[in-house]
């Protein structure tokens, strides 16, 4: 059967055939689940953490021996909201017409809760009604106890986990850790993009989660694998794309998954049988043009010195020594101390990313398309 639609997705997980590589990482997540090892999954934003979790879930669920639950706590601001998200995720996994779902609904009715369903998506939302400060902790214990009792083992992925460090309840980590270490039927994947926060949580001997997980740092997909993947997707739709174009795409997007997918999606949308470099240039122009209004907005959020520094970093692409003489004088950035201050502000605002590898450490404009736009 001829595949339908644009094969380059920008949202969600669309099955193994439209998922590029990540074989080693998937294997590791599956093995960790099978061996009761919790994993901390860390990467830059938009590198593919959530996609990888979904992909590993799909591999685990194919064996029919696992129940996989995904909860995103990005929008939560307290332990109470965390319990709401977790309960909603459990109900999404075990809907009310399923035998476990029925039991779960009975179970949460024992607490004071409201269950509602999104009118458009049908996604359930559970909301606990708390009147005492100790109650969120009790319902959290209850939710985990419910999962612990299930026949099949469970993998629970908590995405954007660093969020819990921002809750007003300063003991959230300790509360969670205490519960987590008693569980034998649940394996965890804690994931997020705030590397410092997560590493601090899991690698600082003074923190409750110290040394309790294996860290998986997700980098770029290998260029050769992505090249293969892009060519194959075009071919499956009876189209071609030449080597020069694919090479350009991967360099221009730094092989950063979301940006590569977005550019490929744009090129594919041009509906051309033989794709060559001119079509790719057009797609790049049109992507940047589409986002220009947002890019101008960023400028209003930054001081002139920060904006100037951001442009300079974009022009260099990678900056290894941001306060070094070459960089500061080439772009006339003023004194190194104020460059340092602006840089800290840009990193804090997530406009600039400090990439630290085993070999080196450098700064880049975080949003690859913004970087390409500024560079012009
Ligand atoms: N291996 C892959 N092959 C193809 N597309 C992928 C792959 N991994 C991720 N994607 C796509 O790339 C985009 C970004 O991925 P994803 O949302 O998983 O990143 P993330 O690291 O979770 O981002 P964020 O930090 O914003 O949560 C999505 O559109 C996703 O569908
Ligand atoms: Mg994500």
Image (cartoon, helix red, strand yellow):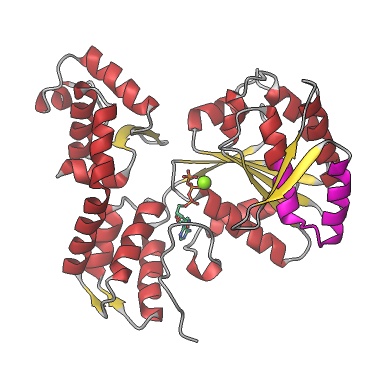
Q: Position of residue 309 (x, y in %)?
A: 21, 27
Residue 43 position, x and y percent, is 48, 42
Total marks placed: 0
Q: Looking at the image, which residue is at 27% across and 26% down?
A: 302
Q: Quadrant of residue 349?
A: top left
x 62%, y 24%: residue: 167
Q: Quadrant of residue 271?
A: bottom left
- Residue 57, percent from left and from top: 65, 57
Residue farthest toward the bottom in the current orientation of the protein: 1
The reply to whether residue 155 is visible in this rendering is: no
Q: Nearer the viewer, residue 110 or 323?
A: 110
Q: What quarter of the picture does the C terminus occupy?
A: top left
Closer to the camera, 252 or 37?
252
Secondary structure character of the magenta stretch overall:
helix
253 relative to 344, above or below: below
Judged left or right of residue 274, residue 190 is: right
Whether 106 is among the magenta residues is yes
Instruction: Give coordinates of residue 251: x percent, y percent.
Output: 27, 54
Which corner quadrant of the image does residue 215 belong to? Answer: top right
Boundaries of the magenta span = 86-109
Q: Is residue 1 above or below residue 179?
A: below
Q: Is residue 199 magenta?
A: no
- The residue closer to the viewer here, 259 or 225, is 259
């Amino acid at each position: 059967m001829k595949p339908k639609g644009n094969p380059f997705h920008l949202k969600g997980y669309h099955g193994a055939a439209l998922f590029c590589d990540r074989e080693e990482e998937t294997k590791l997540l599956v093995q960790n689940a099978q061996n009761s090892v919790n994993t901390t999954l860390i990467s830059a934003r938009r590198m593919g953490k959530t996609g990888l979790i979904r992909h590993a879930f799909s591999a685990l669920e194919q064996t029919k021996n696992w129940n996989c639950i995904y909860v995103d706590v990005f929008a939560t601001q307290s332990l109470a909201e965390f319990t709401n998200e977790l309960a909603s995720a459990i109900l999404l996994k075990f809907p009310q017409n399923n035998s476990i779902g029925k039991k779960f609904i009975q179970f949460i009715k024992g607490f004071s809760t409201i269950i509602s369903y999104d009118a458009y998506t049908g996604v359930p939302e559970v909301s606990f009604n708390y009147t005492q400060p100790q109650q969120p902790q009790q319902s959290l214990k209850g939710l985990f106890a419910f999962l612990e009792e299930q026949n099949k083992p469970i993998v629970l992925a908590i995405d954007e986990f660093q969020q819990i460090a921002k809750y007003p309840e300063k003991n959230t980590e300790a509360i969670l850790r205490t519960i987590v270490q008693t569980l034998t039927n649940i394996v965890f994947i804690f994931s997020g993009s705030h590397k410092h926060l997560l590493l601090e949580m899991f690698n600082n001997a003074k923190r409750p989660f110290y040394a309790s997980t294996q860290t998986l740092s997700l980098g770029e997909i290998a260029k050769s694998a992505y090249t293969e993947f892009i060519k194959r997707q075009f071919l499956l739709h009876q189209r071609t794309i030449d080597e020069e174009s694919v090479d350009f795409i991967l360099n221009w997007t730094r092989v950063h998954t979301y940006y590569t997918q977005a550019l490929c999606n744009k090129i594919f949308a041009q509906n051309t049988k033989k794709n060559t470099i001119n079509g790719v240039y057009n797609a790049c122009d049109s992507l940047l043009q589409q986002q220009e209004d947002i890019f101008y907005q960023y400028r209003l959020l930054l001081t002139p010195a920060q904006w100037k520094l951001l442009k300079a970093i974009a022009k260099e692409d990678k900056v290894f020594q941001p306060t070094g003489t070459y960089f500061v004088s080439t772009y006339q950035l003023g004194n190194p101390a104020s460059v340092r201050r602006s840089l800290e502000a840009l990193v804090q605002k997530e406009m600039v990313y400090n990439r630290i590898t085993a070999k080196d450490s450098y700064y880049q404009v975080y949003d690859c398309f913004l970087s390409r736009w500024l560079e012009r």
